[in-house]
Amino acid sequence: MTPGDSGMMPPSKVLVTGGAGFIGSAVIRLLVGEIGCAVVNVDKLTYAANPSSLAPIDHSPLYAFEQVDICDRTAIAAVLQKHQPDAIMHLAAESHVDRSIDGPGDFIQSNIVGTYTLLEAVRGYWMEMPEESRSRLRFHHISTDEVFGSLGTEGAFTEETRYDPRSPYSASKASSDHLVRAWHETYGLPVVLSNCSNNYGPYHFPEKLIPLMIIKGIRGEPLPVYGKGENIRDWLYVDDHARALWAILSKGRTGESYNVGGDDEVPNIEVVARVCALLDALTPRADGVSHDQQITFVQDRPGHDFRYAIDATKLTRELGWSPRETFETGLRKTVTWYLENNDWWERILDGRYAGQRLGSTETSSD
Ligand code: DAU
């Protein structure tokens, strides 16, 4: 590899945590499959992990897998020693807001204790490195726009927006962001952070809005829209996020954070209507009725953030990134992928998650 425009040498071996998850697997498919960078995937393989999402690259000599929990410091230290990565991309996290309402404990453990434990293991590894490699190491913490809280109808989150998390999930991610910055300020660990808006695309676990609506749509089941469906999210195709993460890791300034977003704000009810229109076109119902007749309005999510919107100007200006997909092109690709890959999601529905309502306060306990 040669130095990029920034003069920085891109990493040649990246340890990715949570690489069997939705965004993590997209990152690994990009790094191994397109960029030619070696990857060590460290994943505990919780309910949301799908090693089959890595099938396109898992035979590559550039790819290695270690089934390890980020909360296990000894095991993480051993993996670092064994593989000697020159960068860490930390994506392992509990990520589903509704599950954080039902059971916040796992979020505190994985997202806060896990990040702390990983930071300490990486700090130990970094301090033992020879000077030349030491100055090259990078710890990239991948986070969410939800740390900034909920917007009204106007404005967008910038890197300067005050943190205001409102769910157990977003509070745990905000805590992990603070830990990463503290390890930079206090110990000098070379970190970079990013906060991204809602992702969608192939291999997305069907607890999230878009894959859940596609799958329930295909199966002729009711499509549960929370409240009145007026909440707004800013959608980004997952492969565009993966490319942004590589740009930030390889060219971003140490100690900085970068917002990532698609500038594609859509109210939930419109997201579901667009999924229905695509299903009508690609797989019409036998009775000729539109899939939108399956839409049902259900009890709202407690503490439901109204709107997220990302201002990604800094990322575009400094690192030259922009998304390749619009919501229209990305959603068509996504619906088509779910129609062609039912074996991938049917295995999940048969065992790990059957599509039931999560995050209703009436059923919450921890
Ligand atoms: O903004 C980034 C975040 O986006 C990530 O950090 C999270 O990990 C990711 O889960 C996502 O959070 P959301 O809560 O926005 O995603 P979710 O797919 O759960 O819900 C999207 C919107 O759709 C939200 O307003 C709630 C609504 N919804 C969700 C489900 C599952 C429904 O109306 N019906 C549903 O069945």
Image: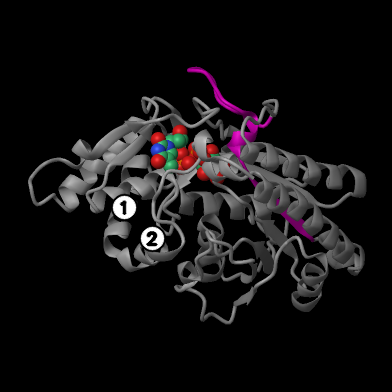
Q: Nearer the viewer, residue 177 or 304?
A: 304
The residue identified by callout 2 is 349
Question: Percent from the top left, x then y, of residue 303?
Answer: 55, 27
User: In this orientation, which residue lies closer to the viewer: 22 or 72?
Assistant: 72
Is any part of residue 322 visible from this angle? no
Q: Which residue is drawn at 21% across and 41% down?
A: 277
Q: Give the mark nearer the N terminus: 2 vs 1.
A: 1
Quadrant of the drawing holding the N terminus: bottom right
Q: Are marks 2 and 1 in contact (CB under 8 Å)?
A: yes
Identify which residue is drawn at 52% across, 18% down: 152
Residue found 64% across the figure and 45% down from its top: 366
* Kind of residue indicated by mark 2: Leu
Circle 2 crowding by C-alpha within 10 Å: few under 14, some 14–19, many from 20: some
Please say if 240 is above or below 225. Answer: below
Label 1: which residue? 215
Vertical position of residue 307 compared to residue 184: above or below: above
User: Which color scheme is applied?
Assistant: one colour
Task: Give the extent of the magenta segment.
Answer: 137-159
| Residue 266 shown left or right of residue 118 in the figure | left
Within 10 Å of disc 1 (Cα), the crowding (few <14, some 14-19, many 20+) is: many
Badge 2 marks a residue whose secondary structure is: helix
Q: Is residue 57 magenta?
A: no
In this orientation, does residue 71 appear?
A: yes
Q: Is residue 17 above or below residue 79?
A: above
